[in-house]
Every structure is written in C-alpha cells, then in structure tokens.
Amino acid sequence: SSLGIGDTRQALDRAPQLLRLPTEQVVQAAAFVLDFCNSSTKLIRLDPTLLCYDVLDLEHGLGQYLPNMMFRGNATQAAVSVRTQLALSPTMALAVVKMGIDGGMEERRVSRALGSAGQASGKATQTIVHETGRTYRGFKKTKDGKSSLG
C-alpha cells in the first residue's frame, strides 16, 4: 500500500527533519525499507524517522549487523523474521529494526575511529623510526670523527 496525503502530513509531524534532507536520500531510504519489508509500509507508518537514515546505514544495520547479531549471519532469515514479526507485532518488528540500524551505525563509527587511530599510530611510528635513524646516523658520524661541527 502507498502513503497517502494524510500519512505524509503525519510523517512530517513526526519526522520534520525529512523536509531538510535531500529528496534522493529519503527516496533511497524508503526504497530500502520497502524492499526489506516486502513492500509493506507498516514500519514507515509506525516510525517515519526510518526515512531519515542514510541508505548505507540501513544496508549495514539490517543487511550485516542484525543478521550477525541475531541470525548467525543469515541475512535472508533476518529479513523473513522481521517480516513475520511485522505481521504479528509491528512495534516489536520496529524495535528489532531500530536495534539493527543503531547497532550497525555504532559498529561503523567504532570501526572508523579504530581505523583513524591505527593510521595515527602508524604515522607516529614512521616518525619515530625516521627520527631514530637520523639520530643514529648523526651519532655514527660523530663517533667516526666526521662531525659536522668540525
């Protein structure tokens, strides 16, 4: 089923940030959620803020994080389970979906932070090695009587 005018107003009342987001981002998020929910609009109607997520966060959270945390890595089983739960208890399905998205976003944030820390550590190590080599070469010249101080 599609979202009607009344649904659109309700969605904007509950997620006013949708007006500030690029249309393409909202369309991509809607397409992903609809595909994940087998064309059901129940989740979007229940929580229109799902349309505010970047599609990469949705893909990672629902395509990788959720399956790995709850379904032994089986993305198909994760989607089927959410769809089944959507028919039985939409609020429970929403809770599972939000847990997957939020967990995936946190996982990606930590991964980026660790990557940045690793790069910084690598650069610091390079600097230390370079300076140590330079100091050693200077020491060697002085020891061998080739001091530039003369």
Image: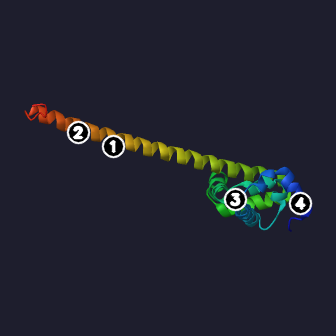
Q: Which mark is residue 78?
A: 3
Give the distance between the C-alpha atoms of the residues marked 3 and 2, in whole angstroms.
56 Å
Q: Amino acid at mark 1?
A: Gln
In this view, the residue farthest toward the left is 145
**Residue 103 located left or right of residue 14:** left
Label 1 Cα neighbours within 10 Å, binned few <14 / some 14-19 / many ≥20: few
The percent position of residue 61, horizontal first and vertical second, equals: 66, 54
- Circle 2 residue: 134
- Circle 1 residue: 126
Earlier-in-chain disc, 4 versus 1: 4
Front in this rendered view, residue 110 or 144: 144
In this view, the residue farthest toward the front is 150
Q: Is residue 40 above or below residue 96?
A: below
Indicate the secondary structure of the residue bearing disc 1.
helix
Indicate the secondary structure of the residue bearing disc 3.
helix
| Labels 3 & 4 near each other (Cβ < 8 A) | no
Q: In this view of the protein, can residue 93 be seen by the observer? A: no
Q: Quadrant of the N terminus?
A: bottom right
| Labels 4 & 1 near each other (Cβ < 8 A) | no
Rendered image quadrant of residue 40: bottom right
The percent position of residue 98, horizontal first and vertical second, equals: 73, 50
Rendered image quadrant of residue 45: bottom right
The percent position of residue 110, horizontal first and vertical second, equals: 56, 45
Give the residue displayed 35% in from the left and 40% down from the top: 125
Look at discs 2 and 1 and give the one toward the viewer.
2
The percent position of residue 65, horizontal first and vertical second, equals: 63, 53
Give the distance between the C-alpha atoms of the residues marked 4 and 1, in whole angstroms.
57 Å
Indicate the secondary structure of the residue bearing disc 4.
helix
- Circle 4 residue: 7
Q: Amino acid at mark 2?
A: Arg
Earlier-in-chain disc, 3 versus 1: 3
